[in-house]
Structure formats: structure tokens, C-alpha cells
Image: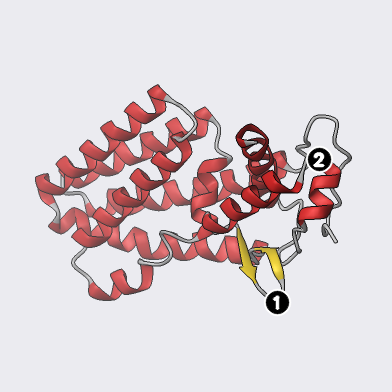
Amino acid sequence: MAVASDKAYELLKQRVIAGTYAPGAQLKEEHIARELDISRTPIRAALKRLVQDGLATADAGRGVRVSEWTEFDIRETYELRGLLEGHAAELAARRGGAELADRLDELNARMEKVLRTGGSSMAEQLQEINAQFHRAILEASGSPRLRAMLAGVIDMPIVIRSYFISTADDLHQSLHHHRDLAGAIRIGDPELARQVMQLHLKVAAHRFQLRRTQFTGIQWPGATPARRRTTE
């Protein structure tokens, strides 16, 4: 049952991320189980994991539904991150010094190790290390206002999702940007730090949109095609 649940979870996760199911669409156990030709128990477990990941919501009156993140939400989130985190990186380069650079290098080394090791939990581990990296820069900025504005954005579901659909090249490119950021902070170059952060997030936004498109249409072997708009 665990294998069936894992497969169902991976397929549904990719469909949600790719936009195969519209934001707000209800994910019904019975319909999905019939489509995938497996029992409802692994589907129920898979849906529960989607809720835990922030990819779906559960409400007693409305059932399990896809989290409502539109294309506008995605663009706006990354644009805001570029503006605000670019400024945070600029401030951090002025104030963080070698201590912050050492911390960022440590996180980059951990990220490289996870990439090298791989495994089923790689995406979750990378997402957590990435969040720590961006939080370290934010904390070093010394700006309570920036921290208040960005604290929730770094952990938004659409940011977390990106690690589930990134290729190996994507992940190594992201690590390369992280290393450049650590380098800019180590030499105390605020303008370079800002530019690298904004480039990093602009590339991340483009990559996320691209991967969403590529993952649309991923199917369970032998399953009937998923409807684009809803499972109802």
C-alpha cells in the first residue's frame, strides 16, 4: 500500500504543480482511485500528504482542493522577492562580513552534498537548506521591516513547489548562484550582491514557469488522461 500511495502522491503532486488541476479544483478520492485503478486508501494518504505540503487544502465542508495559486500570484511573488531580497542582499553585504559568508558557505556545502547523494528526500532537504540560506541573508540585513515583509514569502507553497519539479541542471545552477552570493558578501560588494540575488530569483521564476509547462500531462502508466480543469 505504501508503494501505491507514494506513486499516487508523486503523480498528483506533479499534476498540481503543473496546473493540470485548476486552483480550487476538488480532488475526489473516488474519482482519482477509479482513474488510477487503485483503492481509495492510498489515494487518501496521498491527498493528506498534498495538504501537509501546502499543495492542497482540506475543509470539512468543501473536501480536499488544490491550493489557489494563480499565474499572477506566481509572478507577483517572485517579483516581490526580487525587489525585497535584492535589497536584503545589498544590506547583508554591508553588514554581514566574513561570519555571514562562512555560514552561507556551510549551507552551500550541505546543498552540494545533498545533490551528490540524491535520494527520495532530496527535494525536501534542498528546500529546507535553501530557506535557511535566504533567511540567513535576511537576518543579516538588520532590517526588521524587511524581515516582516519577507518572512512568509520565503516559505510560500509556490516557492517550496519549485524544488519538486527542478532538474539536476536547475539545482546546480541555483547552487552556483548561492556561491556567487556568498562570494559577493565575503568581499563586501553590496551592488554585486543585489544583482546576483535578483538574477537568481529572475531565473528561478522563469524556470518554475517552464517546468510547470513541461510537467503538464504526466500520467500514471495505463491511466486515462486527467481533465484539465477539474476532477469533478
Q: Give the mark, 2 or 1, whose residue is nearer the N terminus.
A: 2
Q: Residue furthest top?
A: 116
The residue located at (29%, 69%) in the rendering is 147
Q: Quadrant of residue 51?
A: bottom right
Q: Quadrant of residue 225?
A: top right
Side of 110 where 81 appears, left or right: right
Side of 38 where 47 appears, left or right: left
Q: Is residue 59 above or below residue 111?
A: below
Name the quarter where the C terminus is drawn.
Answer: bottom right
Please provide percent x and percent y for residue 102: 15, 40
Frontmost residue, 20 versus 33: 33
Name the quarter where the N terminus is drawn.
Answer: top right
Query: Please, what secondary structure does the residue beneath circle 1 have?
Result: loop
Please provide percent x and percent y for residue 179: 30, 36
Identify residue for label 1.
61
Disc 1 marks which amino acid? Gly
Please provide percent x and percent y for residue 192: 29, 48
Task: Compute the Cα span from label 2 to label 1.
Answer: 25 Å
The residue located at (30%, 48%) in the rendering is 133
Q: For the residue carrying disc 2, how many other residues have a C-alpha within 10 Å: few (<14), some (14-19), or many (20+)?
A: many
Q: Residue furthest left?
A: 98
Disc 2 marks which amino acid? Leu
Residue 1: assigned label:
none
Side of 223 where 79 appears, left or right: left
Frontmost residue, 185 versus 210: 210
Identify residue for label 2.
36
